[in-house]
Amino acid sequence: MSKALELVRPDLHVCHASKIPFREFCHEKGISGYVFDLDNTIRHKEYGLDKAAIAAIRQGVKANYIKSLVILTNTIQGEERVAKARKLAFRVGEDIGLYVKAICLDYSKRKPKSDGFYLAIKEIGSSRSEIAMVGDQILSDIKGGNKVGLFTILVDPLGSYSWMSVISGRTIRNQWARWRLDL
Ligand SMILES: [Mg+2]
């Protein structure tokens, strides 16, 4: 496999965030820190936070398989989106019983650039081998996570992509990468 393709290959692919084996990861891999993408990973564009995903994370926290969680999101459409992401992170935190910070990345620092990932690792405060990145986009979430040495988990998107993703060509590039990786 080419190096470029290797960089976008997730370590694990599950259909939904609730299928992540938090217990196994904690016990067998020593992973207990999580960086979650927001849109289409735990938030549906129309229905809001995904109840099943949040419930699974809550259980993971309760059982101490998840010790810290950060939300890492590209918010390139301005302040309003940043405020909304922060509010949602607060809500997730209340729901799962853990402080959850939202790291919002503007255009210059957007995933897959490493800036945000470094901030997330610092916020979690453990070594990279103990942290997993969870997201629906191969070319931002997975590529960025792989670049900085996190364990990467691809989930199927909760809903359709935004018009920005479609127009920018991100949707088609992601589909292409999935096809090449046989996912
Ligand atoms: Mg996403």
Image: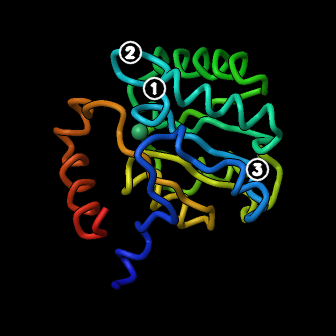
Q: Quadrant of residue 166?
A: top left
Question: Under tag 2, what secondary structure?
Answer: loop
> What kind of residue is marked 1?
Arg
Q: Residues within 10 Å of mark 2 (few under 14, many from 20)?
A: few
Q: In which quadrant of this rendering is ligand 1 seen?
A: top left
- Please name the residue shown 25% across and 39% down the image: 165
> What kind of residue is marked 3?
Ser
Residue 84 position (above or below residue 136): above
Of the numbered discs 3 and 1, the one sitting upstream in the chain is 3
- Please name the residue shown 52% across and 21% down the image: 51
Residue 72's x, y, as percent? 57, 39
Apparent side of residue 102 relative to residue 181 in the rendered image (left or right) = right
Q: Residues within 10 Å of mark 3 (few under 14, many from 20)?
A: many
Residue 133 position (above or below residue 129): above
Of the numbered discs 2 and 3, the one sitting upstream in the chain is 3
Indicate which disc residue 47 carries: 2
Report the quarter where the N terminus lies. Answer: bottom left
Query: Disc 1 marks which residue?
Result: 43
Question: Under tag 3, what secondary structure?
Answer: loop
Query: Disc 3 marks which residue?
Result: 32
